[in-house]
Image (tube, rainbow, N blue to C red):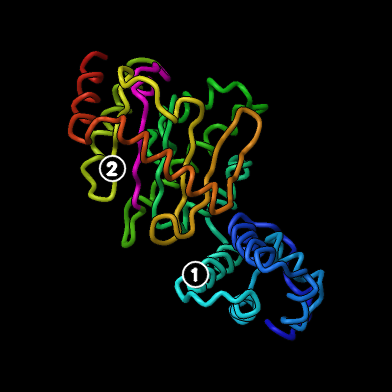
Amino acid sequence: MTGANPDRGVSVSTVLGRRLGGELLRMREGRGLRQAAAAEALTASVAKVAKMERGLVPMRDPDIRALCHLYEERDERVIGRLLELAKTDRDRRKANGWWKQYPELRSMMEYVALEDIATSIRTWQLAIMPGLLQTSDYATALAVGDGGWSDLADIDPFVESRMARQARLSGEKPLQLWSVLHEGALRQLVGGRTVMKDQIGHLLDVARKPTIRLQIVPSLAGAHPGMTSAFTIVSFAEPSAMDVVHMDTTSTTLWLESEEDARRHNAIFDRITRQGLSQGKSLALMEQIRKEL
């Protein structure tokens, strides 16, 4: 809040905080201003501005409006998106979600917390089913196959937490999910034929939900821009307004938080979907593969 203790706040960087801070940083640099000018506008310290731009502290609406005024941002739609992003981040920081009781989630903690408050998710997967659509047997087989567990007893609560995530697909305000899978993910025998037959059957069942869209990119589709990596776009408002991109690698979790990153991956996702089958043909292909099993 303007005029408040400049260093008050929890110094914890969050994905949404960094996205918001990055937008304000871009606006400040676009006007050729230093952090000192922003600090003066807020009657605060340069240290506070630095923390805001790095996503280390929650931001209040008066601060955002004061900075938008300083940076000569007059578009109320832009300001409104920043205010909504700040509110979402504040709510996220205060949340005491169910996922905190599952240390087995490890590096997925922040992703699951954002998934819990997201409005929509678009995900492209090359080799595995998205966590929101996995059966417990499939998730268990994946965990066992990973081979990275120091204590196999941790696998059961990990799978339990993955199943708990799927509550977002139902309820009063279900998550809008658009999942695009490469055909290879359906043919990879994770856990064996019975597990995969049940997994594909589960996909066919959930595809009946009006909030879930499934699409398959067939092996015969040829080259496309999604061949090098899988990714997930997490949205908190209308498409592309406040998107962040999540990617998993073999050693780390990667967040792409800038507006440019979000725009680029939205364009890549659109191109991938154009290479894919329609939902009807996708479901027919899944049924065919299931029968082959």
Badge 1 is on which residue?
A: 78
Identify the residue at horizontal 61%, vertical 40% (top origin).
254
Residue 183 covered by magenta stretch: yes
Element type at marker 1? Answer: helix
Badge 2 is on which residue?
A: 213
Q: Amino acid at mark 1?
A: Val
Q: Where is 249 relative to 270, above or below?
A: above
- The x and y percentages for residue 230 are 48, 32
Circle 1 or circle 2, nearest the eye:
1
Identify the residue at horizontal 67%, vertical 69% (top origin).
31
Q: What range is drawn magenta here?
A: 176-191
Element type at marker 2? Answer: strand
Identify the residue at horizontal 74%, vertical 86% (top origin).
3
**Quadrant of residue 252 in the image?**
top right
Report whether 133 appears left or right of 73.
Answer: left
- The x and y percentages for residue 139 are 45, 30
- The x and y percentages for residue 10 are 73, 67
- The one nearer the camera, 270 or 133, is 270
